[in-house]
Image (cartoon, grey):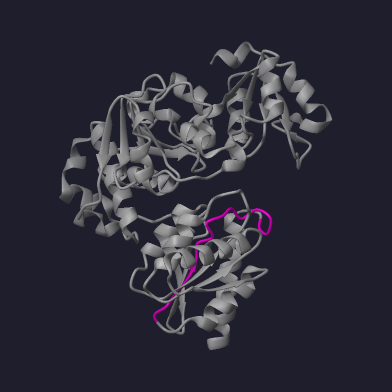
Amino acid sequence: SDLAGASVGVWGLGVEGGANLRKLLAIGSVPVIADDHPNQGEAGGLPILSTAAGGWEALSRCEVVVKTPGISRYRPDVAALEDQGVVVLGGLGLWLEEADRSRVVCITGTKGKSTTTTIVGHLLGGLGRSCLVGGNIGRLPYDPEIDGNLEFTAVEVSSFQATDLACSPPVVAVTSLHPDHLDWHGSVERYYADKLSACTQPGAELTIANGQSKELRNEARQLGPRVEWVEDAPAPWTAPLGLLGAHNRTNALIARACMVALGVQEAADDEALRRAAEGFVGLESRLAEIGTVDGVTFVDDSLSTNALAAIAALDAFAGRPVALIVGGADRGIDYASLATRIASRREPTFVVTLPANGTRIHAAIEEAAASAGSARPEVHDTGDLETAVDKAFAWSEPGAVILLSPAAASFGQFKNYKERAGAFRRAMGVHERRQA
């Protein structure tokens, strides 16, 4: 609300940038708008300036700049704004400053945060409570187009967004921790510190953390004043969620712990939770079975953008032969852990890699197999997804799984994970027609 009378800039017009602009216009602010790669001339009736062609200079004349999370706080041009006295903020952090944080849970983690946030929202709805599910998942609680008058808000917080928070709600959850987004953060250590910063900001009281994560255990000192560790355990009430893998059972248990911490008494009742879990629809492109061709199951896990996600996807199909399609944009991630899991897998495993980091993943698998003295899994490097699916299907027999779990972002070959998932589905369709 303090920005109504200030000179404000909006930097970046993605999903969150659009919400930032709508909120500022709603409170009467007339912001300067800049974008690194503008694809339109104006937004909200205001001109969009290219950052490289006068936009940065316009931002430098503002008192406050609200940036989109994709713009790294560690970029030199961001640091230059701050050196000139411009306050650089994020929309989610501004919203938290004035929200009733006792009704908010922030959920972060290298993987599992989207699923866990979605489970919280679904279960609360099933228990008769209203909940806005938002944040990095695509709906911003301060967007004027969103109904913010709900009882609870479950916010998925990315590591990018976390760097812009100056306060936290009493309850924060962390689903996992593994190196990722090193191009944005600069180092593993900084990524861990940024990812976990919501646990120690003013207002944070309790961190609900995945007790199965060795990395989180190692970083316990960064998890705030009080930690509740959630361990995987039998949980029959989670069955109606229909989610694959032990990691998703842990995500559901973390979601339950979040609701209990928010004071939702019904969350302690297994039977109430089982009923509330019914009708759950999982996220698209997250371990989603999209079809079966000649006895071979196709699984779309295009949302997998790091090694930890691909490991969890492989583990979800223990006991079954898997043709794994892996690779994408190269962000400098260490794939040793994924390579070790592939090399040690007992079931038949066939790996097909994609550019740009596929050959690096291939080399890591070869090294892991040599170090373990195990038989080397069959690995083929390909130039495109259609060829990768062809090779995977040629290897597969009835009962096998063709698993697209890239452990890398889609950029370079695809616009986003949805476009990559669509290409995977089309490639499956080619084999469906051949078998018809």
- Residue 357 picture quarter: bottom right
168 up-or-down from 366: above or below: above
Coordinates of residue 15 in the picture (x, y in percent): 59, 40
Please identify the quarter of the rendering in which residue 320 is found: bottom left
How many marks overall? Answer: 0
Q: In screen coordinates, is 13 left or right of 96?
A: right
Residue 184 locus on image (x, y percent): 60, 38
Residue 312 lies in quadrant: bottom left
Residue 191 relative to residue 168: left or right: right
Q: Is residue 287 visible?
A: no
Tell me if residue 100 can be seen.
Answer: yes
Q: Is residue 66 above or below residue 176?
A: above
Residue shown at the point (59%, 29%) measured from the top left: 20
For image coordinates 71% across by 21% down, the residue present is 80
Left or right of residue 342: residue 18: right
Q: Nearer the viewer, residue 237 or 346?
A: 346
Between 154 and 176, the one lying in front of the other is: 176
What is the magenta segment's predominant secondary structure? Answer: loop
Counting from the top left corner in percent of width and height, residue 300 is at 49, 64
Q: Position of residue 364 (x, y in %)?
A: 54, 61
Residue lying at 42% horizontally and 71% vertically, measured from the top left: 374
| Left or right: residue 374 compared with residue 20 | left
Position of 398 relative to 178 (above/below): below
Magenta residue span: 399-414
Is residue 409 inside the magenta stretch? yes
Q: Residue furthest right?
A: 53
Q: Is residue 401 magenta?
A: yes
